């Protein structure tokens, strides 16, 4: 079971759809021999949980922006 499986099993439609989308994106990277980083998996989980929007994982790559996001988010 991968780290996103729990969201698919929960059955909440929006979470299921987001988890499947993230799984597809990660799978496409793995096809190219790339391994998803812990940061990407963390961002995926946060997006699925509704803690961040789909645009915010891009900000998480930059430590300065990550700090600003943490300071000014919900």
Image (tube, grey):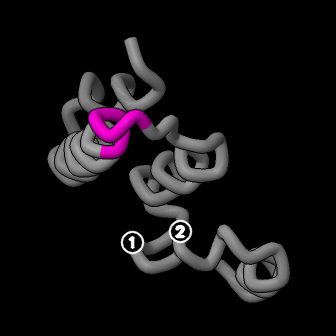
Residue 55 lies, in percent from the top left, at 43, 79
How far apart, in angstroms, are the residues tagged by discs 1 and 2?
Answer: 6 Å
The residue under label 1 is 54
Above or below 36: residue 52: below
Q: Which mark is residue 57?
A: 2
Question: How many labels sit on residues?
Answer: 2
| Residue count near mark 2 (Cα–Cα under 10 Å), binned few <14, some 14–19, many ≥20 | some
Q: In the picture provided, is 40 more to the left or to the right than 67? A: left
Q: Quadrant of the C terminus?
A: bottom right
Q: Main secondary structure of the magenta part?
A: helix
Q: Residue at x 53, y 68 (%)?
A: 57
Q: Secondary structure at mark 1?
A: loop
Residue 18 lies, in percent from the top left, at 26, 52
Spot the residue most to the front: 32
Residue 14 lies, in percent from the top left, at 21, 53
Query: For residue 16, which quarter of the picture?
Result: top left
Above or below 5: residue 59: below
| Residue 15 shows up from this direction | no
Q: Residue at x 45, y 59 (%)?
A: 47
> Mark 1 and 2 residues: CB-CB less than 8 Å, in contact?
yes
**Which segment did they paint magenta?**
29-33
Magenta highlight on residue 50: no
Above or below 20: residue 2: above
Q: Residue at x 54, y 74 (%)?
A: 58
Q: Quadrant of the N terminus?
A: top left
Q: Depth check: 32 or 57 in front?
A: 32
């Amino acid at each position: 079971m991968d780290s996103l499986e729990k969201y698919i099993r929960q059955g909440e439609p929006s979470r299921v759809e987001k988890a499947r989308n993230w799984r597809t994106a990660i799978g496409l990277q793995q096809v190219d021999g790339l391994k998803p980083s812990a940061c990407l998996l963390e961002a995926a989980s946060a997006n699925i949980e509704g803690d961040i929007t789909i645009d915010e994982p891009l900000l998480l790559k930059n430590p300065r922006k990550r700090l600003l996001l943490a300071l000014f988010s919900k």
